[in-house]
Image (cartoon, rainbow, N blue to C red):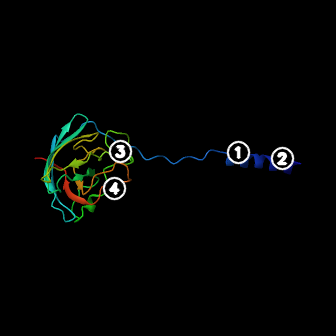
Amino acid sequence: MRVDWLAVVAMAGLAACSSAPVPRPEAPPAPVLAQVGTVMQAEAALAPASASLVSGRLELASQPGGVRITGTLGGLRAHQLAAFHVHERGDCTAVDASSAGGHFNPLGQAHGRAGQGGHHLGDMDNLQADAGGRVAVDVYLAGVVLGGGAGNDILGRALVVHGQGDDYRSQPAGNAGVRVACGVIRSRS
């Protein structure tokens, strides 16, 4: 009888162990997003990529809640629609600018249109060239900062112009075509 009692206690113990909750793996910590960067002014000299003629100089200025990007680009086709994004790495050394990596996306969002639901922090509206293939850039990029090293810091990353307009739907990059210009965002001294 004693053997049966021990078997019952052992079985109850095993049943209790098998129904114990399995610990869930911890999620990685969310990136720290700063509200204010440490740099007020930056610039990016965009050079041609993928055998294009697209180039220009852009200035970046810290503003409340984001960064304003202004300047001029040239070398596009007349009336060309071109996607424009911040990319994750400040490396434009590859001839096709692939060294800049993917879109800047520290929050792990799906690609989309800025200001209209989820999107990468580096997603911006398309640029539209004039009849001479030039575009006057004036873009406000919300949610990012210049300097400080926070998760939303774009200093040291790349600005990239693509050969087609962004469709704001296709994943992961909007079906925007080849990279036609690339420039690293650098602090203005």
Tell me whether the residue at label 2 lies in contact with that at label 4, contact meaning CB atoms closer than 8 angstroms: no
> Dot 3: few (<14), some (14–19), or many (≥20) neighbours within 10 Å?
many
Residue 56 vertical placement versus 38 (above, below): below
Q: Which mark is residue 16?
A: 1
> Dot 1: few (<14), some (14–19), or many (≥20) neighbours within 10 Å?
few
Residue underneath mark 4: 175
Q: Amino acid at mark 3?
A: His
Q: Which mark is residue 119?
A: 3
**Which of disc 2 and disc 3 is earlier in sequence?**
2
Q: Is residue 143 found left or right of 137 in the rendered image?
A: right
- 8, 179: nearer the viewer: 179
- 165, 109: nearer the viewer: 165
Q: Position of residue 85 (x, y in %)?
A: 26, 50
Residue underneath mark 2: 5
- Please name the residue shown 31% across and 52% down the image: 103
Q: Is residue 9 found left or right of 119 in the rendered image?
A: right
Q: Which mark is residue 32?
A: none
**Which of disc 1 and disc 4 is earlier in sequence?**
1
What's the distance in space between the residues labelled 1 and 2, CA to CA? 17 Å
**Which of disc 4 and disc 2 is earlier in sequence?**
2
What's the distance in space between the residues labelled 3 and 2, CA to CA? 62 Å
Q: Amino acid at mark 2?
A: Trp
Task: Select label 3 or label 2 by which is in front.
Answer: 3
